[in-house]
Image (tube, helix red, strand yellow):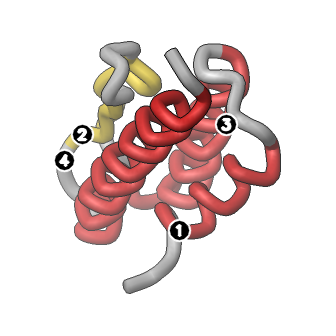
Amino acid sequence: MNPREDIARETQLLLQLVAKVKDLNILVAKESGVMNLKCPCGTVILSATPIISNLKDRQRGLLKSRIKDHLRTKHGISKQTIRLVLTQAFAAD
């Protein structure tokens, strides 16, 4: 595969992941439901975890940490790109 195809695939993966995290943030804001996140590649990043209002900030931190680890180890994405993706994914709309 040429580098242009790799970049296009990586961009698509990151866009899909950001969309999923934004949807998940809506649930966390409502303080109800279950957090679970699966990467577009098929790997489970965070298994089903009930949202607990007292732990909401810590649960978001856990989610960010899991996303960082997954993107670095599984996809080899740079720290700078991950930082940008997380900023976009967790930005208040």
What residue type is disc 2 on? Answer: Val
* Mark 2 in CB contact with mark 3 (< 8 angstroms): no
Q: Is residue 80 left or right of residue 2?
A: right
Count of marks, rendered view: 4
Element carrying mark 2: strand
Element carrying mark 1: helix
Q: Is 36 located above or below residue 82 in the figure?
A: above
Q: Earlier in the sequence, mark 2 or mark 1?
A: 2
Residue 12 x, y percent position in the rendering: 37, 43
Q: Quadrant of residue 2?
A: top right
What residue type is disc 1 on? Answer: Gln
* Mark 2 in CB contact with mark 1 (< 8 angstroms): no
Q: Residue at (53%, 46%) from the top-left corner?
A: 59
Q: Earlier in the sequence, mark 1 or mark 3?
A: 3
Residue designated by label 4: 33
Which numbered mark, 4 or 3, is in the foreground of this view? Answer: 3
* Mark 4 in CB contact with mark 2 (< 8 angstroms): yes
Which residue occupies the foreground of this view, 66 or 35? 66
Q: Earlier in the sequence, mark 1 or mark 4?
A: 4
User: Spatial distance from mark 2 to mark 1, Cα to Cα?
Assistant: 22 Å
Residue designated by label 1: 88
User: Spatial distance from mark 1 to mark 3, Cα to Cα?
Assistant: 13 Å
User: Spatial distance from mark 1 to mark 4, Cα to Cα?
Assistant: 23 Å
Residue 34 is marked as: 2
Q: Earlier in the sequence, mark 2 or mark 3?
A: 2
What residue type is disc 3 on? Answer: Lys
User: Spatial distance from mark 2 to mark 3, Cα to Cα?
Assistant: 20 Å
Q: Residue at (58%, 56%) from the top-left corner?
A: 85
Which residue occupies the foreground of this view, 3 or 42? 3
User: Spatial distance from mark 4 to mark 3, Cα to Cα?
Assistant: 23 Å
